C-alpha cells in the first residue's frame, strides 16, 4: 500500500436511519498539507472526521488513513494510533488533574512522545502548569486538549473546531503552533467555523454541505474568488454609489477622470472568503 | 516495546492516576470509603441485641458490612463513575490514543483493590474497637478471608464495568445503581439477620454474589458453631466459591463484549 496520501477517501457513505449524514464523499489529503473542512452545523464534518479517526464505521466506501483502514480492530489499530493525534470537540474530562499531571500521563501512551515541558510552552500553559483542569478558562481548557493531541508527535493531526472560545491573541499563537507542526512535517485536518482561520492556515479548503463536498480549492481560488467581480464604491451626490466590475482598475481610472483627481471615499472590495462560502452553502438549498 | 509489559506498565500508571483523581473528589471519598463505617456506627449503636450466645447483632452486621464494602468500592463505584467518564468524554479521548482497553481495566481494578483494602481495614479496626468483633486466630480462617476478598472484589469490579452500559447518563447513574445495591443489601442479610427474612427473599438473594459474600464473611468473623444457625446449617464455603467464580466469568465476558466508549 503506497503511503503517498495521508488520507484517501472514496465514495464514503454514512446513514443515520434514512438520512445520509455523509452522501458519497471523495477526499484526498496529501502528506504535509493543512486541509480545512468548512461547512455549516449538521453538514457532516464531524461524522467524516470521526470515521477517519476510527470512532464511527462507514456504511460504504473506502477509507485509508496513513495507509490504514481506521475500522480495523486489534493491535494494528494501536500501532496506527501512535501516529495520529486527535483534538475532539469540547471535552470536560480529567477535571481534578493538573495540566502537568494530565500531559505527562498521556505522554506515557506513545512510543515517541514530545517533550512535556516544551509542549506546555508551545500551547502557552506555562503559567497554568499546576492548575487543575476545572480551574482553566474555556480557551485554556482547549489548549490543554491541543497539548494532549500533539503530545505523541503525530504524523497526522485531527483538529475539530480547535479555537472555539479563544481570544484573538490566543488564536494567533495557536496558528503559529499549527504552522510549526506543519514545518516539522505533520499533516493536519482541521474543521472550523472561522473563515479567517481557514484562510490563514489551510493549503486547501473543502466546503461541505448536506453530506456532500461542494468544492475543494485553495482559499484564494475557492468559488472562483480570484475571478469574481469586485465591488467599487464611492460617494457621489450625498450617497454611496457602487458597481460590480470584473475590471475594477478600469472603473477607478474612469472615476478618477470624472472627479478630476480625488474620488470621495473610494473603496475597492474583493469578495472575502466568508462571502464566497456563504454564497456556496446558500446555493445548495 | 514488549506489548504485554507495556499494557501492564500503563495499567499501573492508570491505577495511580485513578487513585489521585478519586482522592481529590471529597464526595466520593466520603460516600465510598466512610459511608459503610458510618452505617456500622449507626446500626451497631442502635441494635444491641444478642442473636445467638456470644454473637451480638453488631458483630453480625460488621461481617455483612465488610462484604458490602466490596460491592461498594467495586460494583457501585464503577457502575456510577464509568458512565460519568463516558459523558465527560474521558473514554472517547482514551479511545483515540494507543492505550489499550486492558490497561484501562487494570487501572480500575487497582483502584478498587486499594479502596477495598482501606475500607476493609477501617471496618475491621472500627468493628473491633467499638463492637467487640472477634478476630479469627486460626490461620486457615484468614486464608478463607483472603480468597473471599480477592474473589469478591474481582467479581465486584468486572460486574461494575459490565453494568456501566446500563445507566443512560452519568447524571442518572447513581439513581439506577444505588437502589440495586441497597435492595441486595436488605435481601442478602446485611441489615437483617438472613434467616429472619422470608424464604422467597432468601432464594432471590441466593442468585447474586452479595448473599454468598456476607455468609462467607460470617464464617470468618462469627464463632464456628454459629454455622448451625444458617439456612443450610453450614457455611457452604465450596458453593460460595463456585457462585463467585461463575459470576466472575459472566461479568468478565460481558464487560469485554459490551463495553461502550461513547454514548453514540
Image (spheres, coloured by chain):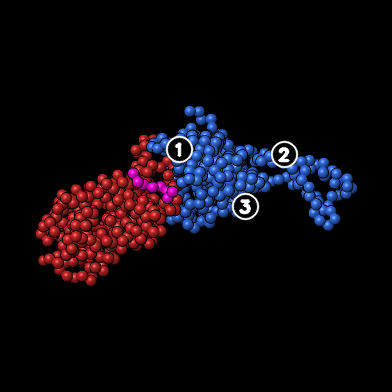
Give the mark nearest the N terminus, 2 or 3.
3
Q: Which residue is mark 1?
A: A70
Q: Is residue B15 magenta?
A: no
The residue under the point 15% across, 49% down is B238
Q: Kindly report which numbered mark, 2 or 1, lies closer to the viewer in this rendering.
A: 2
User: Seen in the image, is A235 located left or right of residue B34?
Assistant: right
Residue B105 vs B179, above or below: the answer is: above
Q: Which residue is mark 2?
A: A227
Magenta part of the protein: which range? Answer: B257-264
Mark linked to residue A97: none
Q: Kindly report which numbered mark, 3 or 1, lies closer to the viewer in this rendering.
A: 1
**In the image, which lettered chain appears blue?**
A
User: Seen in the image, is B182 located left or right of residue A14?
Assistant: left
Q: Is residue B125 visible?
A: no
Residue B115 pos. (x, y %): 31, 55
Residue B181 pos. (x, y %): 29, 59
The residue under the point 34% across, 62% down is B30
Q: Which residue is mark 3?
A: A168
Residue B96 vs B126, above or below: the answer is: above
Q: Secondary structure at mark 1?
A: loop
Residue contact at pointers 3 and 1, CB within 8 angstroms = no
The one of B137 and B201 positioned closer to us in this rendering: B201
What predominant SS class does the magenta segment belong to?
A: loop
Residue contact at pointers 2 and 3, CB within 8 angstroms = no
- Inter-mark Cα distance, 2 to 1: 39 Å
User: Seen in the image, is A116 located left or right of residue A258?
Assistant: left
Q: Colour of chain B?
A: red
Residue B137 pos. (x, y %): 14, 56
| The quadrant where residue A95 appears | bottom left
Amino acid at each position: 500500500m503506497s503511503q503517498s496520501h495521508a488520507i484517501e477517501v472514496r465514495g464514503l457513505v454514512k446513514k443515520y436511519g434514512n438520512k445520509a449524514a455523509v452522501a458519497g464523499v471523495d477526499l484526498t489529503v496529501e502528506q504535509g498539507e493543512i486541509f480545512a473542512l468548512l461547512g455549516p452545523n449538521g453538514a457532516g464534518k464531524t461524522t467524516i472526521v470521526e470515521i477517519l479517526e476510527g470512532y464511527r464505521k462507514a456504511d460504504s466506501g473506502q477509507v485509508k488513513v496513513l495507509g490504514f483502514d481506521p475500522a480495523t480492530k486489534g493491535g494494528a489499530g494501536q500501532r496506527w494510533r501512535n501516529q495520529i493525534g486527535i483534538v475532539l470537540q469540547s471535552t470536560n474530562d480529567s477535571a481534578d488533574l493538573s495540566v502537568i499531571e494530565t500531559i505527562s500521563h498521556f505522554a506515557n501512551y506513545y512510543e515517541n512522545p514530545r517533550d512535556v515541558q516544551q509542549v506546555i510552552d508551545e500551547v502557552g500553559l506555562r503559567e497554568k502548569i499546576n492548575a487543575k483542569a476545572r480551574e482553566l478558562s474555556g480557551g485554556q481548557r482547549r489548549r490543554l486538549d491541543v497539548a494532549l493531541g500533539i503530545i505523541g508527535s503525530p504524523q497526522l493531526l485531527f483538529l475539530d473546531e480547535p479555537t472555539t472560545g479563544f481570544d484573538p491573541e490566543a488564536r494567533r499563537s495557536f496558528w503559529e503552533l499549527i504552522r510549526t507542526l506543519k514545518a516539522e512535517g505533520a499533516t493536519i485536518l482541521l474543521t472550523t467555523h472561522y473563515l479567517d482561520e481557514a484562510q490563514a492556515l489551510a493549503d486547501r479548503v473543502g466546503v461541505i454541505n448536506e453530506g456532500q463536498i461542494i468544492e475543494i480549492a485553495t482559499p484564494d481560488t475557492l468559488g472562483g474568488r480570484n475571478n469574481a467581480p469586485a465591488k467599487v464604491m464611492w460617494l457621489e451626490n450625498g450617497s454611496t454609489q457602487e458597481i460590480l466590475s470584473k475590471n475594477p482598475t478600469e472603473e477607478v481610472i474612469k472615476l478618477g477622470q470624472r472627479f478630476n483627481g480625488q474620488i470621495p471615499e473610494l473603496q475597492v472590495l474583493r469578495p472575502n472568503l466568508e462571502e464566497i462560502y456563504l454564497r456556496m452553502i446558500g446555493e445548495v438549498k | 516495546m514488549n506489548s504485554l509489559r507495556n499494557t501492564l506498565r500503563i495499567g499501573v500508571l492508570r491505577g495511580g492516576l485513578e487513585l489521585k483523581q478519586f482522592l481529590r473528589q471529597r464526595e466520593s471519598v466520603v460516600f465510598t470509603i466512610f459511608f459503610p463505617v458510618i452505617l456500622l456506627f449507626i446500626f451497631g449503636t442502635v441494635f444491641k441485641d444478642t442473636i445467638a450466645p456470644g454473637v451480638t447483632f453488631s458483630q453480625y452486621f460488621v461481617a455483612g458490612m465488610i462484604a458490602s464494602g466490596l460491592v461498594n468500592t467495586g460494583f457501585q463505584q464503577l457502575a456510577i463513575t464509568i458512565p460519568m467518564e463516558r459523558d465527560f468524554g474521558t473514554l472517547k479521548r482514551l479511545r483515540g490514543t494507543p492505550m489499550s482497553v486492558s490497561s484501562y481495566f487494570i487501572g480500575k481494578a487497582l483502584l478498587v483493590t486499594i479502596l477495598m483494602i482501606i475500607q476493609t481495614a477501617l471496618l475491621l479496626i472500627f468493628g473491633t474497637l467499638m463492637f467487640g468483633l472477634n478476630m479469627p486466630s486460626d490461620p486457615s480462617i484468614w486464608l478463607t478471608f483472603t480468597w473471599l476478598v480477592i474473589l469478591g472484589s474481582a467479581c465486584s469490579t468486572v460486574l461494575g464495568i459490565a453494568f456501566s452500559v446500563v445507566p443512560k447518563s452519568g447524571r442518572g447513574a447513581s439513581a439506577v445503581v444505588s437502589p440495586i445495591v441497597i435492595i441486595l443489601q436488605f435481601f442478602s442479610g446485611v441489615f437483617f439477620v438472613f434467616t429472619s427474612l422470608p424464604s422467597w427473599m432468601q432464594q432471590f438473594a441466593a442468585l447474586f454474589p452479595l448473599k454468598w459474600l456476607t455468609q462467607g464473611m460470617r464464617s470468618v468473623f462469627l464463632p464456628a458453631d454459629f454455622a448451625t444457625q444458617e439456612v443450610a446449617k453450614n457455611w457452604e464455603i465450596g458453593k460460595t466459591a463456585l457462585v463467585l467464580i461463575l459470576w466472575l466469568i459472566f461479568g468478565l465476558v460481558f464487560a469485554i463484549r459490551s463495553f461502550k466508549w461513547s454514548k453514540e
